Amino acid sequence: DTGVSQNPRHKITKRGQNVTFRCDPISEHNRLYWYRQTLGQGPEFLTYFQNEAQLEKSRLLSDRFSAERPKGSFSTLEIQRTEQGDSAMYLCASSFRDRDLNTEAFFGQGTRLTVV
Amino acid sequence: KQEVTQIPAALSVPEGENLVLNCSFTDSAIYNLQWFRQDPGKGLTSLLLIQSSQREQTSGRLNASLDKSSGRSTLYIAASQPGDSATYLCAVRVRTALIFGKGTTLSVSS
């Protein structure tokens, strides 16, 4: 396993267009997270999945954002009608949770979105 | 609301120096604390994970400590090298999400 994989690495889009990002987590991890990071800031939590169920969403996740994790494997994050304020690095992470055990979260290389 | 603060925001040291990065958090009810490294334009690389019941973890030249009651963690880097230059992020796990600080940007000169 090569770790968490994100595609594409970079995306430039015009304002108003829709974009979709993909994340492939570490195969045995049952939790998958999406974060957003802007310049000079730490990553901010957007949403997370336990297997295929989306269990928590941040207030940062407006109704233009939607995330899915079909069959508890890869995940997609879609942004509809993009705005310039959506320009950021979108990071995906995965971890394993079983009862009281919380393992390390491993992050992908991120998708850099630029809205022009 | 949990808040994570990292001091200093930036640090420049000559090669070979030992250094300490600080992280503080406002709510001691955490599951664990994780230190990450981030190179410019890249994702995050996990360095150390400390569970809430642990006091410290070591990996090579890195040592991280956790004092949950006072809401503090430190990352000690021994014998710094130019390759250590990066931004170091501290994050605490509360329920499900990791809450991050803004990071300390380290520059090690040769």
Image (spheres, coloured by chain):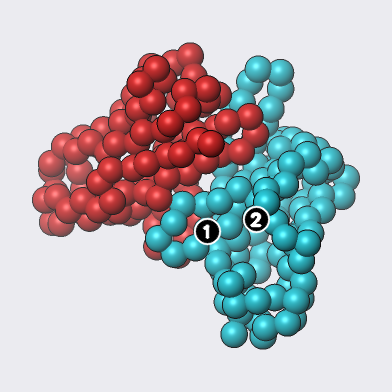
Chain colours: A cyan, B red
Q: Quadrant of the C terminus of chain A?
A: bottom right
Q: Is residue B82 left or right of residue A43?
A: left
Q: Is residue B77 left or right of residue B16?
A: right
Residue at 87% across, 50% down: A70
Q: Secondary structure at mark 2?
A: loop
Residue at the extreme right: A71
Q: Chain of mark 2?
A: A
Q: Is residue B83 visible?
A: no
Quarter of the figure with residue A60: bottom right
Q: What residue sits right under mark 1 in the picture?
A: A37
Q: Secondary structure at mark 1?
A: strand
How crowded pointer 2 is (Cα within 10 Å; few <14, some 14-19, many 20+) is rated as: few
Mark 1 vs 2, N-terminal side: 1
Is residue B18 or residue A64 the one in the foreground? A64
Could you tell me how far apart the alpha carbons at marks 1 and 2 are, in whole angstroms? 12 Å
Quarter of the figure with residue A9: bottom right
| Disc 2 residue type (three-letter) | Leu
